[in-house]
Amino acid sequence: MIISYYDFQNLPDRQAQYDFVITHGRLISERTTSQSKYVLYEVSNFSVELIYDIFNNKIIDINVFENKTSHLNGY
């Protein structure tokens, strides 16, 4: 499903954004630290990073990148 960066940012709430990414995003990469797991997805023409608390197994934050390649150095 295609969605614009602007429309994604204007989804009703964070939960709607999480659900959209998990359902429609394409997994690009992931990395784990001692407390968190960072999962990078491609969504339409932008990227989304979901940050999970690995101890509670829940999403704790989201980062949305308008440019698909500018943030890949961290992965």
Image: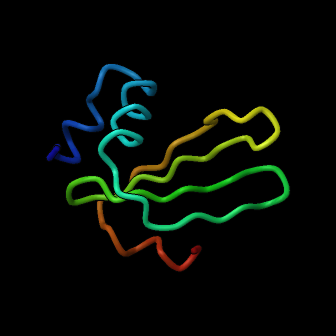
Residue furthest out toward the bottom: 73
Rendered location of residue 29, percent (x, y): 51, 67
- Residue drawn at point x = 33 percent, y = 35 percent: 20
Residue 10 drawn above or below residue 72: above
In-front residue for pair 68/19: 19
Residue 7 found in image quarter: top left
Rendered location of residue 16, percent (x, y): 37, 25
Circle count: 0
- Residue drawn at point x = 40 percent, y = 50 percent: 64
Coloring scheme of the render?
rainbow
Rendered location of residue 53, percent (x, y): 73, 41
Residue 60 found in image quarter: top right
Q: Classify the position of the C terminus by image quarter.
A: bottom right
Residue 6 found in image quarter: top left
- Residue drawn at point x = 82 percent, y = 50 percent: 35
> Is residue 26 rendered to the left or right of residue 61?
left
Q: Classify the position of the N terminus by image quarter.
A: top left
> Is residue 63 rendered to the left or right of residue 60?
left
Rendered location of residue 42, percent (x, y): 34, 59
Residue 14 drawn above or below residue 73: above
Residue furthest out toward the top: 12
- Residue drawn at point x = 66 percent, y = 33 percent: 58
